[in-house]
Amino acid sequence: MLVLVFRHVPFEDLGLIARSLENAGLEYRYADLYRGAAAPSAAQADAFIFMGGPQSANDGLDFIEREIELIRSAAEAGKPVLGVCLGSQMIAKALGARVYRNPVKEIGWYPVSWTAACAGDALFHGFHEPELLFHWHGETFDLPPGGELLASSEACRNQAFRVGSNIYGLQFHLEVTPEMIAGWCQEDANSADVRELTEPLDPYANAARLAGLSDRVFGRWAGLVTRRS
């Protein structure tokens, strides 16, 4: 079984998600359309993951538009689709929702609360108490038609959603390692965001807990892919 993964910059990769895919025996391959790779069809993989990046889903970039069209095709085919940060915004747009600037940028460790819909959710059942998660975004989105809200934060209402049983969007970064966070802070593409911070980010602030949550959520997602395939 093959999972195609779409990066938008080289430094925002699968991170901790890779471990869950490997533990489930799933093959994954990066499809870097931003580097000029040809766009695959929905029939070429069993599942799809769309990662984050400094771009906007509204930029009108050719590779963004091709990925949005692929999300639509995969959704119509009933394939599992997972989006992280920019990827979640692209899913929302592909399914008919609006993507727009959030009132504030949310960068760093902030608590996320879970909705009652998590009780019956394949990925988030058992999530009750707020969790301190990592964020790096300036935009948000409306829930797409049929979307079920799973998580919110004080600064951003739509933090996680599900459409049907196979499509998930996560605004927060559950996949990051401390090394990824430290690296992001050094990237030129993120320099403007870093200059706006009132204090340095601590990559290790809640890293151990986040890694455990990541294994739980992405392990469940990998199981969903296996069962649907």
Image: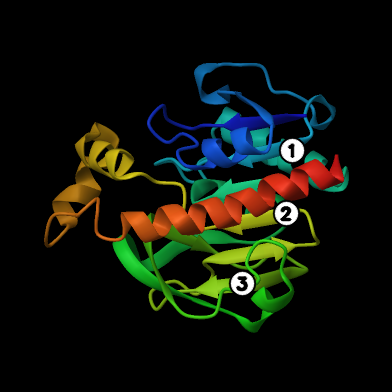
Q: Are marks 1 and 2 in contact (CB under 8 Å)?
A: no
Q: Position of residue 179 (x, y in %)?
A: 28, 38
Can residue 57 be seen in this snapshot?
Answer: no
**Amino acid type of disc 3?**
Leu
| Residue topped by disc 3 | 150
For the point 61% across and 72% down, the residue is 150
Circles 2 and 3 in contact, beta carbons < 8 Å = no
Could you tell whether 13 is left or right of 48 in the image?
Answer: left
Q: Quadrant of the C terminus?
A: top right
Q: Is residue 8 above or below residue 151?
A: above
Residue in the image at 60% along x and 67% along y:
142
Q: Which mark is residue 167?
A: 2
Q: Residues within 10 Å of mark 3 (few under 14, many from 20)?
A: many
Q: Tell me the SS state at disc 3.
A: strand
Three-letter amino acid code at the position of disc 1: Ala
Q: Residue furthest bottom?
A: 116
For label 2, the SS is strand
Looking at the picture, tell me which residue is in the foreground, 183 or 37.
183
Q: Is residue 198 left or right of residue 48?
A: left
Q: Which residue is mark 1?
A: 47
Q: Is residue 163 above or below residue 182?
A: below
Residue 109 x, y percent position in the rendering: 30, 63
Q: How many marks?
A: 3
Q: Position of residue 102 (x, y in %)?
A: 41, 66
Residue 136, disc = none
